[in-house]
C-alpha cells in the first residue's frame, strides 16, 4: 500500500489513528490537520517528537507569514539562482535550480547564513501554497513538487567547504520540516564532477529522498517531456514556454544568477576551521602523502600560515612511505610561494591517474623564520567509488 489517503493497509490506518491521538494537543497549531498532512510524516518515518520541533521551527521562522511579511536581502534575490515555473503532467509545481552561474563565495561574503536558510523556508512555503492552489484547481490532493537540477557549469567553486556546510543545513531543514515534499528530482547536464559533489551531500538526505533523484543522460529533454507538457516546460529545456518577451529561459520566473559584485560584500572572509596544524622549522619542509587508488578522485586543500608566506606544491611518486626530495618526484602542481598569512589559500586537483600524491609545504627558502601552518586536506570520491568502499587514504608526515 502507498501509505496515502485511500490506499492504507490496516497497519497504516492504525498508525495514522495513533499519531492523530498523540498530537491532538498540538495539531491545531500545525499548518494542516488533514490525514494527508499526517501521513506525510508517517511515510517519512519522522519521530513523533519532530512534530513539536516542527512547530517551534515554524514559530522561529515565522513560516505562516514569511511569504508576505519578509523579503530576502537584495543579493539573495538577484544572485541565488532558481525559481518556480510551470507544473508537471500530474499538476505538481516545478522548481528549477540552476547551479553553474551561482557564486557561492560571493553570496556567503554578502549575506548571513540565517538569511539563506530563511530564504529557502520562504521558497518552501511559497511552493506549499502553490500545491494548495493546485489541490483546489484540480480537485485532488497535490502535496509535493518536481525539481529540475541544472548542473551545467558545476565546478570546484561549488564544492567550497563553507558552501557545502550551508547546503547541508538547508537539506537537513528540508528533511526535518517538509517531509515527503519532493515528488521527484531530475538532474540534467551532470558533468564528471557530479558524483563527487553528490557524495559530499548525500548523507544529509534520507533513503526515501535519495530514491527520488534521477540523473538523466543526453536524452534529458525527451525524458522531461514525458513528465511535463511542452506548454509548461521552458523552451530552453525542450518545451515551448517562454516569457512574454520571448525569452526561452523564462528569466521572469527563474533566476540565473552570476558573479556577485564586491559592492555587496559585508565581510572580507569566512572563518575556516582547519583540521590540522604543523610547525615547519626554518629551512625545512613538510610532506603529506595520499594514496589515490582510482582515477577521477579529487584532492582538495585549504591552508593558512601565521606571520609570513609559505611555499606549496603537489608531487607524485611511485611508492607510499618512501620519503623523497622534491626534485626526485614528478611535479604535478608547481611549487610556489603563497601569501597564506594574508588570505587563506585553497585549491584542488583532479587525479587523472592512481598513485601516491604528495602535498608539500616548503619553508626551505627561509633561514630565519619557522612557520605554523593550519590546513585541511580531503580526498573526494565519486558516489560510485564511495559505495564500493574501496578507497584508502594514508598520510605520512616528514621533515627535512
Image (cartoon, rainbow, N blue to C red):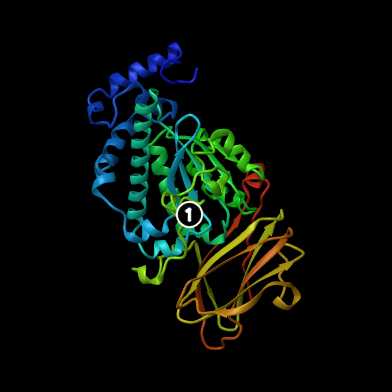
Would you place residue 225 above or below residue 375 in this image?
Answer: above
Q: Position of residue 26 (x, y in %)?
A: 24, 28
> In which quadrant will I find the C terminus?
bottom right
103 horizontally vs 285: left or right: left
Would you place residue 49 above or below residue 306 in this image?
Answer: above
Q: Which element type, helix, strand or loop, lies under badge 1? A: helix
Q: Position of residue 341 (x, y in %)?
A: 46, 77
Would you place residue 333 above or below residue 258 in this image?
Answer: below
Q: Position of residue 366 (x, y in %)?
A: 56, 86
Nearest to the observer: residue 139 or residue 239: 239
Which residue is situated farthest in the top direction here?
A: 10
Residue drawn at x 56%, y 51% is 151
Neighbor class of circle 1 (other Cα within 10 Å; few <14, some 14-19, many 20+) is some
Quick check: can you spot residue 249? yes
Q: Quarter-wise, where is residue 336 in the image?
A: bottom right
Nearest to the observer: residue 47 or residue 217: 217
Which residue is situated farthest in the front direction here?
A: 245
Q: Position of residue 278 (x, y in %)?
A: 52, 70
363 horizontally vs 115: left or right: right
* Residue beneath disc 1: 164
Q: Quarter-wise, where is residue 92 in the image?
A: top left
Residue drawn at x 58%, y 62% is 300
Residue drawn at x 51%, y 41% is 233
Q: Quarter-wise, where is residue 313 in the image?
A: bottom right
Amino acid at each position: 500500500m502507498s501509505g496515502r489517503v485511500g490506499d492504507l493497509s490496516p497497519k497504516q490506518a492504525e498508525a495514522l489513528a495513533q499519531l492523530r491521538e498523540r498530537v491532538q494537543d498540538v495539531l491545531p497549531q500545525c499548518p494542516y490537520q488533514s490525514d494527508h498532512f499526517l501521513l506525510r510524516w508517517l511515510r517519512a518515518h519522522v519521530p513523533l517528537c519532530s512534530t513539536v520541533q516542527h512547530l517551534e521551527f515554524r514559530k522561529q521562522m515565522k513560516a505562516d507569514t514569511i511569504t508576505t511579511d519578509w523579503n530576502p536581502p537584495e543579493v539573495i534575490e538577484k544572485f541565488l539562482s532558481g525559481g518556480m515555473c510551470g507544473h508537471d503532467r500530474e499538476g505538481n509545481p516545478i522548481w528549477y535550480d540552476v547551479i553553474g552561474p551561482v557564486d557561492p563565495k560571493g553570496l556567503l561574503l554578502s549575506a548571513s547564513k540565517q538569511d539563506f536558510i530563511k530564504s529557502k523556508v520562504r521558497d518552501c512555503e511559497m511552493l506549499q501554497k502553490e500545491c494548495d492552489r493546485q489541490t483546489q484547481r484540480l480537485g485532488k490532493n497535490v502535496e509535493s513538487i518536481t525539481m529540475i537540477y541544472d548542473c551545467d557549469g558545476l565546478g570546484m567553486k561549488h564544492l567550497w567547504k563553507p558552501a557545502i556546510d550551508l547546503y547541508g543545513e538547508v537539506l537537513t531543514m528540508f528533511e526535518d520540516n517538509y517531509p515527503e515534499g519532493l515528488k521527484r528530482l531530475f538532474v540534467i547536464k551532470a558533468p564528471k564532477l557530479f558524483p563527487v559533489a553528490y557524495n559530499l551531500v548525500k548523507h544529509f538526505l534520507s533513503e526515501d529522498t535519495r530514491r527520488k533523484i534521477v540523473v538523466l543522460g543526453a536524452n534529458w529533454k525527451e525524458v522531461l517531456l514525458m513528465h511535463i507538457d511542452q506548454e509548461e516546460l521552458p523552451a530552453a529545456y525542450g518545451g515551448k514556454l517562454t516569457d512574454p518577451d520571448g525569452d526561452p529561459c523564462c528569466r521572469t520566473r527563474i533566476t540565473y544568477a552570476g558573479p556577485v559584485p564586491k559592492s555587496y560584500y559585508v565581510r572580507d572572509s569566512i572563518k575556516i576551521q582547519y583540521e590540522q596544524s604543523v610547525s615547519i622549522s626554518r629551512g625545512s619542509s613538510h610532506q603529506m602523502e595520499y594514496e589515490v587508488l582510482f582515477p577521477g578522485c579529487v584532492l582538495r586543500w585549504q591552508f593558512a600560515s601565521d606571520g609570513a608566506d609559505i611555499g606549496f606544491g603537489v608531487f607524485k611518486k611511485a611508492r607510499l612511505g618512501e620519503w623523497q626530495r622534491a626534485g626526485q618526484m614528478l611535479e604535478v602542481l608547481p611549487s610556489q610561494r603563497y601569501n597564506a598569512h594574508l588570505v587563506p589559500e585553497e585549491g584542488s586537483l583532479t587525479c587523472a591517474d592512481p598513485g601516491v600524491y604528495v602535498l608539500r609545504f616548503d619553508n626551505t627558502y627561509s633561514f630565519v623564520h619557522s612557520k605554523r601552518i593550519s590546513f585541511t586536506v580531503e580526498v573526494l570520491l565519486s558516489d560510485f567509488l564511495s559505495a564500493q568502499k574501496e578507497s584508502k587514504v594514508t598520510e605520512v608526515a616528514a621533515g627535512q
